[in-house]
Image (spheres, rainbow, N blue to C red):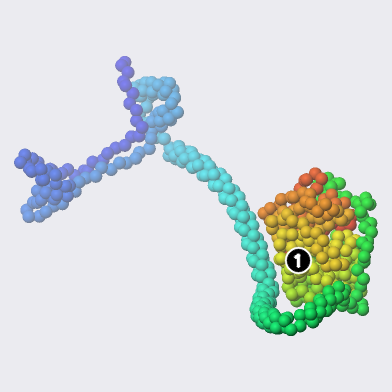
Amino acid sequence: MPTQDPIYYIEKVEIEEDAESVDYEEVKYDDDLSDSEAEEDLETALRSIQQNFQIDGMQESVEIPKATVSRRPEVVDDFIRNFLIRYKMTRTLDAFQREWYELQTRGGLENPELVPDCYVQNEELENRVKFLQREIEKMRRSVNKAGTQYIKMKKERDYHRMHHRRIVQEKEKLFTDIRRLKKHYQSYEPALEELKNKYETAMREKMLTKIECEKNMSKISNLTTTLTNYETARASANEVTLNQMKEVELDEIVQKAEEPKKTFEHPKDSVIPIEPGANPDINSSLPVTCHLTKPGGYHQQHSFKAHDLAVSNMALHPLRDVIATVSDDATWKMWSVPDGELLLTGRGHTMWIGGCDFHPQGTKLATGSGDTSVKVWDFSEGECVSTFNDHSHPVWGVAWHHSGNFLASCSMDNSSKLFDVVSERCRCTFRGHSDSVNSLTFLPYSNILCTCSADKTISMWDIRTGLCAQTFYGHVNAINNVSFNTQGTAIASCDAYGIVKIWDVRQVVEIETYDFEPHPANSVQFDTSGACLAVASNDGSVKMLEIEKNKVTELNGHEDGVQGALFNRNGEMLISASSDSTVKIWS
């Protein structure tokens, strides 16, 4: 029996036709239609067809029958075929087709059963489940990607928040600095006004002096002419008498010149020592600062705010671990170190205080101010016991003589003065600098006073005679500070461009030069051994200079220029004061 080709059905459908038949009239095709008529649209064609079906004056609408598709359930064999085709089981499908048609030929299959809907629905549900699983996997990948992006955005948010906080802190710091600078500027306005008034007064006095000098010169010229005429008239009459009178007048002048000048002496004046005192440190072995002996050198131990405005200078007590600080807020304070406990506060100056120094016995403190006054404060009495107003311009610094009876000061009026604290008067004025005298100090246990000036020179004065004994030349900028070593054999000086020089006192020569430009060096200080030099720099650091090794290390911590640096007596501590209103202890 010949085998028929198998027939495959994916899904069996029937197309139902409309029961009513419609008679269509043939529409003749006209070959003579123009191109424009041939290109008419669908609506025009339908309209023309409807016009052809008018019967007895009545227009009937033409309805086009629509085919409907009804879906019938799959039969069992189609379901099995579709299942095998889906999973590509071709051999099993061939065997099923062969046995199925053999059974159908024998008449064993009259009415094939339909597949129950539950199987079809299960298949649809399974397909939908697979589709949803794929969607879930896509969403899971999207969620993971979104989570990673969220973590990244969170980190960026935290970074920007931290950056914003830092910017806010920096802004607050800048605002604080601006307010402090405004207050600092306001404190200078009275001084500038006073200096302007003094300058105008000095100029008026200068003009009056010049006018008076011209009048005196005119009088002298007239008197000289009169005297010449008188001598000429008398010469012929009595030449011998005139010569004798001239000789007598000349002898009187010579006698007056040879007479010793009498100086005014106060009954309470102290006696300046004729012989210098013995320096106990000149041959003794002094302790070396721990910056040179301990690894790592100095480190910051303590810091405290000393004043409301910039700390301009400080001094170390000669017997105790106590320091005195002076400030632009017109006050001085005493502190214990290293704990920074406030001991005393002094008020009395009307403007900023530029310098201070302890009495050799530690019982008094001297201060010099921008109000042109020098004051002496007695700790036992708790008040100011002496005030000297001899300077005409602001006072930069003060220094005690080793006897404790004399106090020296330097000023912007180009001079230095020596005051007797017993008789409370100025004993001597040292004039020789052509610009402001910025700092001064005594050679240890001697009558030699050393001054430095904005005229770029260093001068050494004998306080007994008031004369300049020696001058050092070498700086090319204004000198800010000068200091002796403990033995009194060397001088250190620093200027406004950061140049530091060391000088030999005996040979009056320059030993070494160190360059810390471009920031100004405000102060220099030897340690007790003379092997290390601390330089207070305007860049906010303290430069530690090891002289023998020519090695420099920096101590950083201040936020503004450092105005002073001091070693304590045993060299275990370094104390620095800054324009940021703080004092720091390094050990």
Mark 1 neighbour density, 10 Å: few (under 14) some (14–19) many (20 or more): few
Instruction: Determine which residue is flagged by label 1.
Output: 432
User: What residue is drawn where x is 14% and y is 46%?
Assistant: 40
- Say whether residue 295 is left or right of residue 117: right
Quick one: 550 or 585, which is closer to the camera? 550
User: What residue is drawn where x is 76% and y is 53%?
Assistant: 501
- Say whether residue 57 is left or right of residue 479: left
| Residue 181 at x, y percent in the picture | 66, 67
- Residue type pointed to by label 1: Gly
- Say whether residue 516 is left or right of residue 119: right
Q: How many marks?
A: 1
**Could you tell me if residue 304 is visible in this image?**
no
Displayed quadrant of residue 414: bottom right
| Residue 367 at x, y percent in the picture | 81, 70
Quick one: 17 or 496, which is closer to the camera? 496
Q: Is residue 349 above or below residue 547?
A: below
User: What residue is drawn where x is 73% and y is 70%?
Assistant: 413
| Residue 489 at x, y percent in the picture | 86, 53
| Residue 534 at x, y percent in the picture | 79, 54
Quick one: 276 or 383, which is closer to the camera? 276
- Say whether residue 9 is left or right of residue 285: left
Displayed quadrant of residue 485: bottom right
Q: Is residue 496 above or below residue 346?
A: above
Helix, strand or loop at label 1? It is loop
Quadrant including the N terminus: top left
Quick one: 7 or 304, which is closer to the camera? 304
User: What residue is drawn where x is 31% and y is 16%?
Assistant: 2
